[in-house]
Image (spheres, helix red, strand yellow):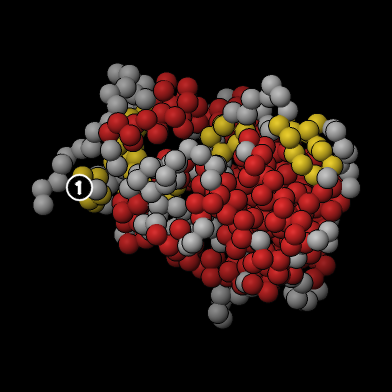
Amino acid sequence: MKLSPAPPGPKGHFLLGSLPEIQRDELDFLVQQVRQHGDVVHIRVVNHDSYVLSHPRDIEAVLITKSNNFIKSVFLRESRALFGDGLLTSDGTLWQRQRRMLQPAFHHEHILYYTKTMLDSTARMLATWKDGEERDVHNDMTRLTMEIVAKVLFGEEFDSEAEHACEAFGLFFRQYDERFGLYLIPEWLPTPANFRYRRAIKRLDEIVLGIIRRKRASMNGNGHSPAVLSIMLSAHDGDGPGMPEQQVRDEMMTLFFTGHETTALALAWTFHLLGQNPEKEQTLQAEVDTVLAGRAPGFQDLARMPYLDMVFKESLRLYPPAFGVVREALSDCEIGGYSIPKGATLAMFQWVVHRDPRFFERPDDFIPERWENDFAKSLPRCAYFPFGAGSRICIGNTFAQAEVPLLLASIIQKFQLKPVPGHRVVTAPSLTLRPLRGIRVKLQKR
């Protein structure tokens, strides 16, 4: 078969390409370009060419069947100042070794143990909430999931460090966006944004390395704690050595970031969707009330709350916290009938694919019921991939699939979160899909 030399795409500005449109509204721009040009779209930003893939067949090729020909994108590689060579940024044999050593920390028996931490932390948060007060639910969920992931990862309370960590992560996001706003400002340039970026990372380093060193000093050869850090410090790859401190730091920073950030966003966006769809919220409340009958939820209850599971799936469809996957081609290849050159950037956006009317009827509507009757099994592989796909699927996906429903059930059982009139929720795509000015809600005690 003769391959077409280049896929279609927007012409863009002669110098900037599609940068102005992306800066104006990236998500809408991507949806419109795919609908106009098809399953493979060529997009130029300044002097960089990217190919947006939106058919599950092509996404499966990149993430699964031909995954050996693709590595993490330049965007993630340029985030190594924060993540180092952790699972999020590493490739090849290093990634395989680290994944193998970390996987036991996320086995089923550990997830069961972690649920007590999830529920205890949620109960403490709810005890501080008051009927009628206004809150930013994204901020609250960030602090809650940070407390949970700190306990799970580090095995210690995090109250004294939480404020500093939240501030540092917030600063990191602001400066990350500024560095990439004009398409990859090199980190070595002495710009004010880069100085602030490095200062945020230094603060996070102080926090994480301090905990690692305290934990190592306190273990005294006993590595049987269920905390991930203890498991990691005791881990060995066969007969080989354990992880050096820098590698432990990189993995813990990666897990700390992904473990609280994406879960907090999944919860916040779910409350936003429920607030916009009160009839769905009422259905969920009725299920939670019937199954729990006033007691706290447990892991065993999740199987008895199918509507809760459907709400979670539908929220991840419409607002996937990790809203895009980007890879770089190691050699010339063929994707979707087009020649893709070595070094090309291939971008696959859950935000776009999850809204494809070929696979989802009324794709822009929040319809948890669509997941009834094993709907997921009828979808093509990679038509729905909120946690990624293939061997590099998120290592914490089973943790998130327990944590988010448990926290949702715990909160919905006690409070209804009503949208604050006049507050407009705006998506802000960055490393993750964040709400630009938070998600304001008014608490109504049930």
Q: Nearer the viewer, residue 270 or 337?
A: 270
Above or below for 215 versus 335: below
Give how far across and how far down residue 435 sits, in percent. Answer: 62, 33
Residue at 70% x, 69% y is 300
Q: Nearer the viewer, residue 35 or 40?
A: 35
**Which residue in the protein does label 1 denote?**
337
Q: Nearer the viewer, residue 57 or 308?
A: 308
Above or below for 11 versus 326: above
The quarter of the rendered structure image containing the C terminus is: top right
390 relative to 109 in the view: left or right: left
Give how far across and how far down residue 278 sits, in percent. Answer: 66, 39
Residue at 15% x, 41% y is 4
Give how far across and how far down residue 321 sits, in percent. Answer: 56, 44
Q: Total marks drawn?
A: 1
Taking the view exactly as shown, the residue that stands out farthest to the left is: 2
Residue at 56% x, 31% y is 428
